[in-house]
Image (cartoon, coloured by chain):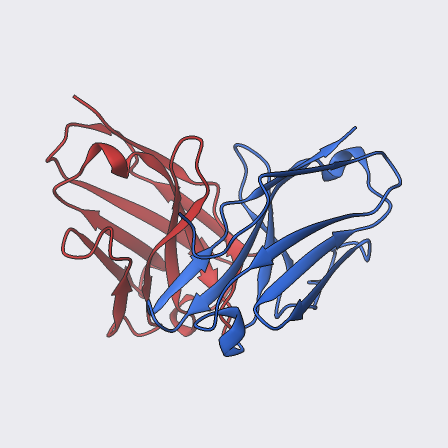
């Protein structure tokens, strides 16, 4: 059974930093691209970032480019999201999502972790 | 403003058929990128409902179906049930933005 478990969400002040983790199990982690998707309070889903299976390639939404860094440790089946220069508008539930190989969709999602940026 | 446009809400009585539309442009749905649909209940993990515009993952009831034409797509729910009350999101890929894009979501209410 595929499982994705996010952690690391917290209350942080504007301008602060945070690192999210996503522990994966139930599939060959190193074979799949992984994503972060977020949902701000009362808003819809917003794609944040994707990383290739090897970790050599990463892409970001314009809203987080230059501030967020996606990475992965295939030896520990774990996905990360480093977040710097956090803004109030980054407040959201952050989900990690497994990308289906050969298509542009996300076939499994975690339960999410809440990041609150507030003074 | 979302790249993909969905109605904010749709509703129907139990047993009825409802549809949720998703309108894109020539850089996403019209560029032959498939549309995918997710069901999301507050506080839970989003669930893949339809992939590659028309396909259902294993375990998804055949009451759910998807279609795509031109720059638009639709999700249909037939035989509406109380448990179908949730938010539904369409998703595709946009070549102009080089990004995965979502609609703003549609709340389906069972009357």
Residue in the image at 79% along x and 54% along y: B61
Q: Viewer-proximal residue, B6 or B58?
A: B6
In-image side of B40 versus B10 (left or right): left
Q: Quadrant of the C terminus of chain B?
A: top right
- The percent position of residue B1, horizontal first and vertical second, equals 40, 47
Q: Is residue A1 above or below residue A110?
A: below
Chain A colour as displayed? red
Q: Can I make out residue A9 in this image? A: yes
- The percent position of residue B8, horizontal first and vertical second, equals 58, 39
Residue in the image at 26% along x and 36% along y: A89
Q: Can I make out residue A102 in this image? A: no
Q: Viewer-proximal residue, B37 or A96?
A: B37
| Number of numbered labels in the structure image | 0
- The percent position of residue B35, horizontal first and vertical second, equals 57, 65
- The percent position of residue B90, horizontal first and vertical second, equals 56, 55
Q: Is residue B13 above or below residue A54?
A: above
Chain B colour as displayed? blue
Q: Is residue B77 above or below residue B15?
A: below
Residue in the image at 53% along x and 74% along y: B30
Q: Quadrant of residue A20?
A: top left
User: In the displayed image of the protein, which residue is found farthest to the top?
Assistant: A119
Q: Quadrant of residue B105?
A: top right
Q: Viewer-proximal residue, B105 or A8?
A: B105
Q: Is residue B79 above or below residue A102?
A: above
Residue in the image at 38% along x and 73% along y: B95
């Amino acid at each position: 059974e595929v499982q994705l478990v996010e952690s690391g969400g917290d209350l942080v002040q504007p301008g602060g930093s945070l690192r999210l983790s996503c522990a994966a199990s139930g599939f060959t982690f190193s074979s799949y691209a992984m994503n972060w998707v977020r949902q701000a309070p009362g808003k819809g889903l917003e794609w944040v970032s994707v990383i290739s299976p090897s970790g050599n390639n990463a892409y970001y939404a314009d809203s987080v480019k230059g501030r967020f860094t996606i990475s992965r440790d295939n030896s520990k089946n774990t996905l990360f999201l480093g977040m710097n220069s956090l803004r109030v508008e980054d407040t959201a539930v952050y989900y990690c999502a497994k990308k289906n190989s050969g298509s542009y969709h996300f076939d499994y999602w975690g339960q999410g972790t809440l990041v609150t940026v507030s003074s | 403003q979302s790249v993909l446009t969905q109605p904010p809400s749709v509703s129907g009585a139990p047993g009825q058929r409802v549809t949720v539309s998703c309108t894109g442009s020539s850089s996403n749905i019209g560029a032959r990128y498939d549309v995918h649909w997710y069901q999301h209940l507050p506080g839970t993990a989003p669930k893949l409902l339809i992939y590659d515009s028309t396909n259902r993952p294993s375990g998804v009831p055949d009451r759910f179906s998807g279609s795509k034409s031109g720059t638009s797509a639709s999700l249909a729910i037939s035989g509406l049930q109380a448990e179908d009350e949730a938010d539904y999101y369409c998703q595709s890929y946009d070549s102009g933005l080089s990004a995965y894009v979502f609609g703003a979501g549609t709340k389906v209410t069972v009357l």
